[in-house]
Image (cartoon, rainbow, N blue to C red):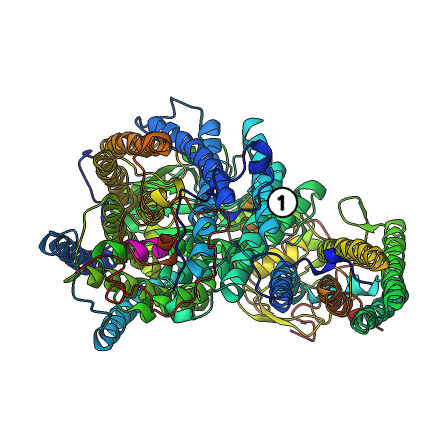
Amino acid sequence: MIAKVRAAETPNYLTAEQGIRSWLLTTDHKRIALLYIAAITFFFMLGGVAALLMRLELLTPTADLVQPETYNKLFTAHGVIMVWFFLIPSIPTTLGNFLIPLMVGAKDVAFPKLNLFSWYLFMTGGCITLYALASGGVDTGWTFYTPFSTVYSTTHVITAAIGIFIVGFSSILTGLNFITTIHRLRAPGLTWFRLPLFIWSNYATSVVMVLATPVLAITLLMIVVERVFQVGIFSPWLGGDPVLFQHLFWFYSHPAVYIMVLPSMGVVSELVAAFSRRSVFGYTFVAFASIAIAVISFLVWGHHMFVAGLSVYSAMAFSFLSYLVAVPSAVKVFNWTATLYKGSVSWDTPMLYAIGFIGLFTIGGMTGLFLAALGIDVHVTDTYFVIAHFHYIMVGGAVMGYLGGLHYWWPKISGRMYPETLAKASALTIFLGFNLTFFPQFVLGWLGMPRRYASYPPEWQFLHIISTAGATILGVGYLLPLVYLTWAWKFGPSAGPNPWRATGLEWQVPSPPPKHNFEVTPVITRKAYDYAGMKEELRLG
Amino acid sequence: MVSAKSLALREHYATPQHQRDTATLGMWLFLATEVMFFGGLFTAFAVYRMYYTQGFLEGSREMTLVIGTVNTAVLFTSCLTMSLAIRAIADGRQFRTYVLLLVTAGIGLVFVALKFTEYYLHYEEHKVPGIWFTSNQPNSGPEELFFVFYFVMTGLHVIHLSIGIGLTALLAFRTAVGRFSPGYHTPISNVGLYWHFVDIVWSFLYVIFYVPGFH
Amino acid sequence: MNSLDLLPPTASTYANQLNDFFWVMVAVCAVVATAIAIFLIYCAVRYHRKDPDELPEQIRGDNKLEITWTVVPAIIFMGMFGWGAKTYFDVEQPPVNSMNIYVVAEQWMWKIQHPDGIREINTLHVPIDTPVRLTMISQDVIHDFFVPAFRIKQDVLPRRYMTIWFQATKAGKYHLFCAEYCGAKHAGMIGWVYAMNPADYQQWVDRGGGEGSLASTGEKLFHQFGCANCHRYEGHGPGPDLRGLYGHQVTLATGVTRIADQTYLRDCIMGDKGGPVAGFRDHIMPTFQGQLSEEQLLAVISYIQAMGPATGTQTPSSAGTTLDDYGRQPGIAEPGATSTAGTKPDSR
């Protein structure tokens, strides 16, 4: 039995201490989560502005809004910021930090001071990279391909590389913290297969973070060495191999995309369970699918290099493995969909985001099947087809999962409820704007529009206009939650401990939770998503 | 003599043993990231060695074998003293632990000194890519590439070692003020793990850089 | 082109093959995606929560279903993999009788060289119904040769020859793009491919503008840079006789064997081949790195490729040259020349 604490008697984590020092020197995982929310929201807006400028430029076929050199810096900024300063940290450092200890029944993560240090590393890396972007920018693309980035580019490559190097360690330490927490701090009775699927997803993500990110770090270090000393690790003129850079870079960057999407899948599992009032269908299969995705993700990096100079045989191996990694993703989609069947499906905003995720992730994933096909990839790689593919997964998938989770757990984090009608309207705006922006890009890609072009053949302008119109709508859609979630923080109606009547340890504590989460460590006897077993407590049936 | 601080059980741990095991898991995970970190460099080195066997062999021949071998012996000795230090604190022998930790750090400093001497010798022989590099080979590219890897990998190693020396010295002083006991010396065990790891990395570096130039 | 065209032109044999595969993929994926979408919406509507307290049937799973929807997609994916691999194989293996065209990519332009000497910048004229193999290299950073109408794309690397091939099927003017970001004017590194009917193509060639074939340009460079001084036809110069070399196996002094292809020859000239050839240890070939541009390299290699076999007495005859059988200007004696033609170094 879990001892219930009456909210009125105990200060919560927000009110326990006051003043800026208590925030900047906090070791409370919940406060650190909020520090991260502020940081990544800032970076998301910055990356979004870059995207908007790019889309405005692309309204016309010529490079007339900005110079081509500036456009090159814009897409680099957009990629660098969105990948390393928004998508990779997003769910793990915000929702993950806030919820993982709560969901496992612990009072904090394994290494709370390390957690705060991670945030400072993130901010340091962020400031250094922002400095690089502000003092003239970087024009190599977020992929830093050599020899352009090491020999030919005249922009602030070294500074940006150092900033990303530092932020990589923030990622590594967070992953390390989560793995240790999940292994060692689970409450008594909480066996692995009683854990919520959000934990499984974040565990898989953390393993990838810990093992893949160091390879990025060393690759960036080699770029810096090559650029500073003008020696040829990757440049051909001293015997270096530019394709080796690509192997090392993608060895990290492919698993990185799973760092970006796995936590979102974890959120979706929680949402479909709560809003169908059911366990996720095939719990064990979904749990193992997360692990399978994490493992296989390390074996497919070559699919970014099918036209880069791989041997035909290694290309075939990578294509085969890329199809293999699609199987557990498909399994998850089928299981989520089946969860709704004969469930009790509510249409609250988080569920709209979850359903949106499933649909858009399916489209994104299927276009991944196109890209994994060697013959087709020859035509569509390095075109807008790829851009559309990964935005369907990252924006239609990961970001919508993040927003869904943010809305779902907002009452727990803030103690207050957001305005439901406005939230629904925003979700629909985002869904509409998103599809309008990115679906035409599949068509553009198949037509042959290359990536990273500020100018293009005039006959493709119509598609670009639709895409830009969609981007504007999408931008508005993103501004709305920023406004009303902030508003709700102060003025929203009070939410009780469990406004959604969901299972999960996080809903057993007050909203907002007390500083140490649980007065008494809970003892777990139920399986995950045990709606039938908890029906008295949740007043159901 | 054991101070209250040393047994500070963080509130989210059930028992001191629990806290110890968790910290140790954390250190092992950190070492896994270090394996991947150095692994990238070893992979790149392996690829180029395959392409440029001859040039890399020339590079190995330019290595100062004596210093490299002495350094290997030096580091192995420091591993011995580190292990003895951990044994000592487990037995409660505070002074012995303090001395052994200081000796370990000192031996580490010997390594660093020898390494920088070696770097200086390479500089004198004009084998520092990007700063001063000449070669008697008609195509000096591969040999220069060899030296790029040599300086980057051993440089990274020496940085890691220096951090280890700092931590070991810090632990020595903490031992002196009685922070550790047989019941609590997790930081020493974990820094010990780190120290051994750094030594293992060195043995691989020795094999790939020095050994091919043996005759 | 009408701005409402949503599909690229289909102008090569590969494009035709790929279209079939593409549309099958679209059909399969559209069907599955639509099915999932419809099922999701159906469940959301049909099982919409009416009573706020309702507790639905707690179905936790079905192993048979799990296995089915794991195995069936896996099988479908294997089919997709197989079809994709097959098409890829086809586009990566040029037919033996392909017409060779050389491409040098440079920031920010495409320089095309036809073997008969015609040069183009940012345009490529080819006849239809003829397999064309492009041998490509970059002067600086990585570029990418992309012709959407032919569905071909290949990264063009520095210091390494890459090949791609196509056979145009429909006369027309098609976009050429650089598809690997290469710096400031990446978006300007574009051009046109003109696929022409054989008659039109011949006309274009005749109007031409070649100053002699690529091989004859190479021959001039071969003498200009002193290659002929060491690589003498008599057979015992400081360097090996290059006649008949192209395409054959070479053994280096280290014991390594290589095939004397374009990459090998380029490595020799750039000093990268990894040591002297067996039997020629005493004279190390100097490196010409930085002295020859990629286009000049291609010309020299074309010349070596066109050299006849070692035992024959004919040298490649090219229009406009006045060099004798040994590649010298007639009337100029080479110091130290002997007349033992036909002897070969012992270890080839």
Residue closest to the far front: A9
Front residue of A199/C286: it is: A199
Q: Which residue is mark 1?
A: C292
Q: Is residue C38 left or right of residue C9?
A: left
Crowding at mark 1 (Cα within 10 Å: few <14, some 14-19, many 20+): some
Front residue of A496/C139: it is: A496
- Residue C257 included in the magenta stretch of the image: no
Vertical relation: A271 (above or below) A478? below
Please identify the quadrant where the N terminus of chain B is shown.
Answer: bottom right
Q: Which residues are magenta?
A: A265-271
Q: Secondary structure at mark 1?
A: loop
Q: Is any atom of residue C178 visible in this view?
A: no
Question: How many numbered marks are there?
Answer: 1
Residue closest to the far left: C46
SS assignment for the magenta stretch, majority = helix
Q: Amino acid at mark 1?
A: Leu
Where residue A68 sits, quadrant-wise, is top left
Q: Looking at the image, which residue is at 55% across and 27% down?
A: A134
- Residue A267 included in the magenta stretch of the image: yes
* Residue C298 percent coordinates (x, y): 54, 50
Q: Is any atom of residue A298 visible in this view?
A: yes
